[in-house]
Amino acid sequence: MKLKSSLLLVLFATSVFAGDPKSHPKIRKKMKDVLTSVIPDTDSSIWKSFPLKSDNVNIQVLDKISGKVFRAKMSVGQSVRFGTITIGLEKAFVNNPDDMDEVYAYIKIQENGKIIFNDWLFASSPSINLFTHPVYDVRVEF
């Protein structure tokens, strides 16, 4: 139970302070203290670093009907149109190079002016927040 609550604290703090850990050294130290009390291995990547803001990510769109794959490097604030959908990148984060690779992207997808997806996508686990559409499959790549 102690581990579970500690990990929840880390996940919350990481999401709140992502990208700017230097401005929150007391919180970072507290998180490290909490985690090392449960996980004595100080080399553990769980508390090493916060995700860093990223200016761009790579996306892949699969047209399930034709089998065509479209890849694009998107910048934050940019939108890309593919077929009937428009994909907009709202926010992007990457893990610090000391940690395992991960790319997080907050994506907004519209079809015919209607928002059909507005959530986070993760490169390492595309099935966590799966974008389901009868024609298109959208993923974030490393």
Image (cartoon, helix red, strand yellow):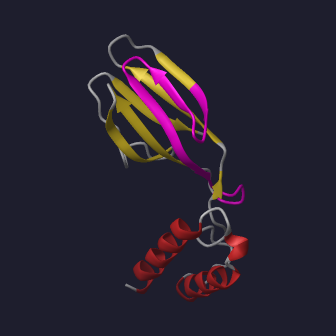
Choose between 115 and 121: the one closer to the eye: 115
Seen in the picture, residue 101 relative to 70 is either above or below; the reply is below
Q: Position of residue 132 (x, y in %)?
A: 30, 35
Choose between 119 and 4: the one closer to the eye: 119
Furthest-front residue in this view? 113
Image point (26%, 25%), residue name? 134
Span colored in magenta: 72-99
Q: Quadrant of residue 98?
A: bottom right
Seen in the picture, residue 95 relative to 24 is either above or below; the reply is above
Image point (42%, 40%), residue name? 108
For the C terminus, the image quarter is: top right
Q: Quadrant of residue 135?
A: top left
Query: How would you classify the magenta stretch by its main secondary structure?
Result: strand
Image point (48%, 72%), residue name? 12
Q: Position of residue 75 (x, y in %)?
A: 62, 37
Horizontal side of 73 relative to 80 (left or right) equals right
Count of labels in the image? 0
Q: Quadrant of residue 76?
A: top right
Q: Does the magenta segment cover residue 46?
A: no
